Image: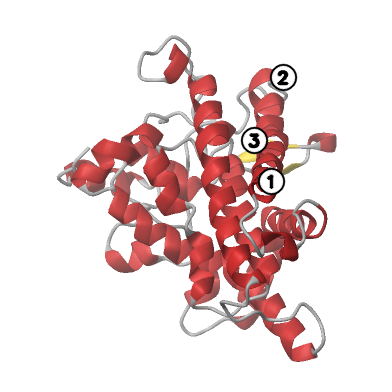
Amino acid sequence: MGIGEVTLPPLYDRPPRPLAMARWTVTKLLWWQGGLWIAVGVAAWNWLTPSLENFATPAAWAVALVYLRNVALMIAVAGGLHWWLFIRRSQDTQHKYDERWLSVGRRPFLFRNQTRDNVFWSLASACSVAALYESLMLWLYANDLIWTVPASGSLLALGYTAALTLLIFPLGSVHFYANHRLLHTKHLYRWAHSLHHRNVNIGPWSGVSMHPLEHVLYLSAPLMFLLIPANPYVITLTATYFLLSPAASHSGFDRFVVAGGRTVAGGDRFHTLHHRYFDCNYGTAIVPLDKWLGTFHDGSDEAILKINRRPQAAR
């Protein structure tokens, strides 16, 4: 199947449509993927991360545990999706953007195998860099070097943390757009980002299959909370969201077939268009910076003709 056209959420409609905005937030943003990433972040903070006091002094074992947690989660999420969609081929090419399967025998990929290449960069580099950023931020919280919002104690603190949990998605969108545009400059693209763009036909392990320099930029999202007061749980939520959510958005399937033949939202059409046409859709649809800054591609025939006439950015 083709990628199809994409539409922007009703968050920025004028005049405002509050009911449409609320419906989109519940039925599109939170169900099912947004809610899953929040649940994973909560579980990772409460049960899979060393307690905050363990980060008060540099402790290699605490950082190592965060890394191993990241590896386990990546294997569960990206590995699980890959097994279901590409090994078991449970829905064959139904709802697949590109009918080809992942590359084997191509020289640009490590081991001449796209999947093994993607797994290597995801586990060796992405999980490591994410663990280092998270551990750095938790060290700052453990030593009271940045403002900590308590997890409980007042309705105001609880409400603020709940609101910030939802704001992870638009804040992350702005962060992603900024570092992604930077990575598409001539030298950074050639030195780093081109590794990710080898994956034109994408799969779950492609999501964070990146050069270590790109991981340093992309996974720096927790540093936003050097300026934004937060509860430390938000750091783990942000780190796991940025690490894991690309597995679904890069799955290569628009819909996932579940029990009874029903389907749920799968890959991200918006970002899949970026992998196919390169010079477009640098951010995400939740904050339409691409629309505002002239790099939006909605997948229509008109947009394809327009981008084919545009001088290409340096590759």
Task: Work out whether residue 310 can be spotted.
Answer: yes
Q: Which residue lies furthest to the top in this view?
A: 105
Q: Which residue is drawn at 27% across and 48% down?
A: 184
Question: Which sits earlier in the primary sequence, circle 3 or circle 1?
Answer: 1
Q: Which of 165 and 211 is in front in this view?
A: 211
Q: Residue at x 46, y 50 (%)?
A: 270
- Where residue 285 sits in the image (x, y, percent)? 48, 60
The residues tagged by marks 2 and 3 sit, at their Cα atoms, a distance apart of: 14 Å
Q: Which residue is under mark 2? A: 88
Q: In this view, does 126 lie above or below 53?
A: above
Q: Which amino acid does label 1 sit on?
A: Trp
Q: Which residue lies furthest to the left in this view?
A: 311
Disc 3 or disc 1, which is closer to the eye? 1
The residues tagged by marks 2 and 1 sit, at their Cα atoms, a distance apart of: 36 Å
Q: What residue type is labelled 3?
A: Ala
Apparent side of residue 78 relative to residue 242 in the rendered image (left or right):
right
Q: What residue type is labelled 2?
A: Arg
Q: Is mark 2 on a helix, strand or loop?
A: loop
Q: Which residue is under mark 3? A: 78
Disc 2 or disc 1, which is closer to the eye? 1
Q: Which residue is drawn at 36% across and 56% down?
A: 179
Task: Work out whether residue 96 can be spotted.
Answer: no
Q: Nearer the viewer, residue 283 or 262?
A: 283
Q: Which residue is under mark 1? A: 61
- Where residue 277 sits in the image (x, y, percent)? 32, 40
